[in-house]
């Protein structure tokens, strides 16, 4: 069973347990992160949901970083949307309306199945099908997608990242202030994280 289908099954199983509950805009826009908030190293990812290189990072590299650094308390991983086109913005908005406990499973599903929805003739319909698996009704989906405050909040965060770190492409990563551009091999992240850990000693 592939990672995508495992995530799909997880969302299907979880959906009946907890009905979709509308989040406040503040809750929906809260920082999404994995790991120890007091970790010595912070890894920030700026990512566009329809970006193939971003999907490659999530499929091939993130799991290793999670196992070796996030789960061991050394790294706090922060995910920030940086949508480069309308499909990516729509996916970002919908992900923000999913229950926070399922957020990363939903994002991983979108990246794992990116070609199926991002290149579809009707990507919004494909996103709605996936949102339903996370417990979102048709009316909830429409209300989420039409939420102007969510749109503006995601846009503001992307603009802030662009201003602070001169980000103009995705994926872009910040490791304790050090910028890494592109879906680079795991070994490059390993070197940057180890250097940041060493600097904290």
Image (cartoon, helix red, strand yellow):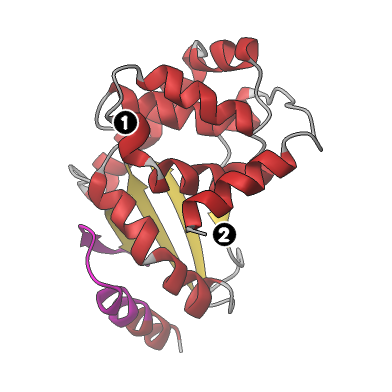
1 and 2 marks in contact (CB < 8 Å): no
Residue 17 visible in the shown view: yes
Is residue 143 inside the magenta stretch? no
On the question of residue 160 being in view, the answer is: no
* Closer to us: 99 or 108: 108
- Above or below, 67 against 55 in this view is below
Mark 1–mark 2 distance (CA, rounded to whole Å): 25 Å
Q: What residue is at 68 percent from the left and 26 percent from the top? A: 23
Residue 190 within the segment the image draws in magenta: yes
SS of the residue under disc 2: strand
Q: Nearer the viewer, mark 1 or mark 2?
A: 1
Q: Which residues are magenta?
A: 176-193
Q: Give the tally of numbered discs.
A: 2
Quarter holding residue 141: top right
Category of crowding for the residue at label 2, using alpha-carbon neighbours closer than 10 angstroms: few (below 14), some (14–19), many (at least 20): some
10 Å crowding of disc 1: few (<14), some (14-19), many (20+): many
Q: Which residue is mark 1?
A: 118
Q: Indicate whether 107 appears above or below 172.
A: above
Residue 162 picture location, percent across and down: 25, 41
Q: Is residue 173 left or right of residue 106?
A: left
Residue 46 lies, with reference to residue 188, above or below; the image says above
Q: Residue farthest to the right?
A: 17
Secondary structure found at label 1: helix
> In percent of the image, x 40 and y 23: which residue is there?
90
Residue 34 percent coordinates (x, y): 57, 59
Looking at the image, which residue is at 53% across and 71% down?
70
Kindly identify which numbered label has been placed on residue 152: none
Q: Residue at x 78, y 34 (%)?
A: 16
Badge 2 is on which residue?
34
The percent coordinates of residue 126 (x first, y second) are: 43, 24
């Amino acid at each position: 069973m592939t990672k995508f289908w495992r995530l799909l099954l997880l969302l299907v199983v979880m959906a009946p347990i907890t009905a979709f509950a509308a989040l406040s805009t503040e809750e929906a826009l809260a920082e999404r992160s994995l790991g120890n908030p007091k970790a010595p190293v912070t890894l920030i990812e700026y990512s566009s949901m329809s970006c193939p290189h971003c999907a490659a990072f999530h499929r091939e590299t993130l799991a290793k970083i999670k196992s070796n650094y996030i789960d061991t308390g050394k790294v706090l991983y922060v995910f920030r949307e940086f949508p480069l086109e309308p499909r990516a913005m729509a996916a970002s908005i919908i992900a923000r309306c999913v229950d926070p406990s399922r957020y990363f499973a939903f994002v991983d599903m979108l990246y794992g199945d990116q070609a199926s929805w991002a290149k579809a003739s009707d990507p919004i319909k494909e996103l709605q099908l996936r949102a339903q698996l996370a417990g979102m009704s048709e009316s909830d989906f429409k209300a989420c997608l039409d939420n102007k405050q969510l749109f503006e909040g995601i846009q503001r965060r992307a603009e802030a990242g662009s201003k602070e770190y001169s980000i103009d492409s995705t994926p872009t990563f910040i490791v304790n202030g050090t910028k890494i551009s592109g879906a680079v091999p795991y070994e490059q992240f390993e070197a940057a994280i180890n250097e940041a850990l060493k600097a904290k000693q």
